[in-house]
Amino acid sequence: MMPTMASKLYSNPSAALEGLTFDGMMVGVGGFGLCGIPENLIVALRDTEVSALTCVSNNAGVDDWGLGLLLQTKQITKMLSSYVGENAEFERQFMADELEIEFCPQGTLAERLRAGGAGIRGFYTKTGVGTIVADGKETMDFDGETCVLERGIVCDLSLVKAWKADEAGNLIYRKTARNFNPMVAMAGRVTVAEVEEIVPIGTFDPDQIHTPSIYVNRIVQNSFEKRIEQRTVTPS
């Protein structure tokens, strides 16, 4: 008799996070600005009242949405980000020395997450050489070019947003929501995905899968607000 696969499906975001959070943990969060963020899981994470979080994300959302909600409640003590320009509370906490920040070039951040998920402890890159990004880091010359050592990132918990999942946990992202989500999913010791639709195993063409199920531990289906960070329209 073939063993049955344990279900990865959870009824709501709070249930999907149950037993996974602890104070001082590192949390990776997918998305770019407000595009492709796991908005319901972020709210559920806030409601756990977990504290002293290190959050790894391209940015910190806006003041009243995304990771900005966790900044409001002072649950984040350190951010590892590449862009933080849309969040006034982020700026206030940083200027008041209430929030530790590690800035990381955007491409380097993506590769650090991917490398962590692939089991690569570190890699060398030219990006950041000669700037404060390289301060205190090992450098090495390759073919006459100086490169800086960057470490792979492994998160205690990763939260991602996908368009569709099958019941095994294979994920497909939609358009620009396929930004940092695939790398964040790889980098988590435990990865929770919130999705718009769940389909039976075998529905997906294997060539269309963006994140294989091996990286995904839990899935929850949600509805989304899909806020627009900066609305730009063409005059009529």
Image (cartoon, rainbow, N blue to C red):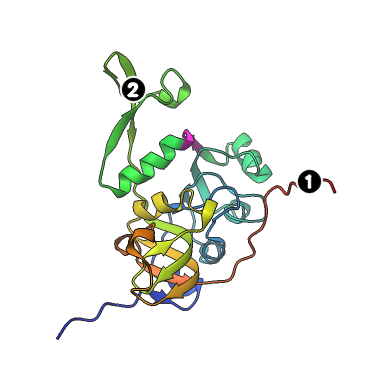
Q: Which mark is residue 224?
A: none
Q: Identify residue for label 2.
A: 147
Residue 109 lies, with reference to residue 25, above or below; the image says above
Label 1 environment density (alpha carbons within 10 Å; few <14, some 14–19, many ≥20): few
Which residue occupies the foreground of this view, 215 or 84?
215
Residue 236 lies, with reference to residue 190, above or below; the image says above
Of the two numbered discs 1 and 2 on the same chain, state the one appearing first in sequence. Answer: 2
Please indicate whether residue 125 sits to the left or right of residue 54 in the image.
left
Q: What residue type is labelled 1?
A: Thr
Q: In which quarter of the image is the N terminus?
A: bottom left
Q: Is residue 223 magenta?
A: no
The span shown in magenta is: 101-106
Q: Position of residue 163 (x, y in %)?
A: 50, 64
Q: What element carries label 1?
A: loop
Q: Where is residue 208 in the image (x, y as percent from the top left)?
A: 39, 60
Q: Identify residue for label 1.
A: 234
Q: What residue type is labelled 2?
A: Cys
Which residue occupies the foreground of this view, 77 or 82?
82
